[in-house]
Image (cartoon, grey):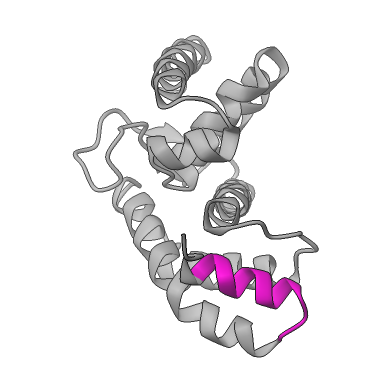
Amino acid sequence: MPVPPVTQLLMEWRGGRQSALEELMPLVHTELHRIARGYMRRENAGHTLQPTAVVNEAFLKLVDAKVDWRDRVHFKAVAAQTMRRLLVDHARAKQREKRGGAVTMLTLNDELHGPAESAVDVADLDLALRKLAEIDERKSRVIELHYFGGLTYDELAEALEISAATIDRELRLAKAWLHRELDASGAD
């Protein structure tokens, strides 16, 4: 079975071929931009962070990361963590600027481009995800990779080495826990 182009380029880049990064950039940039656009659509109308800015900053951080890239799914998983940190840092910076003023909101709907349900403050979501990680690291990771990284059920199953059925169950339970936690904290 042939190695997919992104995986091949990641391996070549890891092996020291710097020109592989130039070939890799347009392939992953398009996918990361699609994911970032989905997040930005779910935010409040007044948000100031643009998808291109998220992608560019995430990509710069990924290029500088000391990661032993395995494949495209691994790259997307690390990108998910990076985008989550960027969105949370941006939300916190806006809150500091306005002392609790403008906050970055997003939704927990399954479709990256689907209709929004009740909005959630990114900083509150981050705190809830950290609490969930203390209770169940895998459920927290599933949410992070799915909502912040745009990984499909099959990609999640591959990245976490569990079945797609387990992914479905973990996502449903994690989402229910997050909704309850965010409702209890008054974040909705």
Q: Is residue 44 left or right of residue 115?
A: right
Judge from the rendering whether residue 110 lies leftward or rightward of residue 156; answer left or right.
left
Q: Quadrant of residue 31?
A: bottom left
Q: Is residue 173 left or right of residue 128?
A: left
Coordinates of residue 129 in the picture (x, y in percent)? 60, 27
Percent position of residue 35, x then y: 39, 56
Q: Is residue 81 above or below residue 15?
A: above
Residue 56, percent from left and from top: 54, 73
Question: Magenta span has 79?
Answer: no
Q: Nearer the viewer, residue 13 or 104?
A: 13
Residue at point 41%, 27% (across, down)? 164
Q: Residue furthest left?
A: 115
**Count the marks: how many?**
0
Residue pushed farthest front? 1
**On screen, 144 above or below 67?**
above
**Residue 46 shows in the view:** no
Q: Which residues are magenta?
A: 6-17
Residue 16 colored in magenta in the image: yes
- The extreme right residue here reads 66
- Quick check: 159 above or below 12? above
Extreme residue toward the bottom, this view: 19
Above or below: residue 81 compared with residue 75 = above
Q: Main secondary structure of the magenta part?
A: helix
The part of the image, by quadrant, that contains residue 11 is: bottom right
Would you identify the image quadrant in which residue 16 lies?
A: bottom right
Residue located 29% across and 52% down the image: 41
Seen from the viewer's position, the closer of residues 118 and 14 is 14
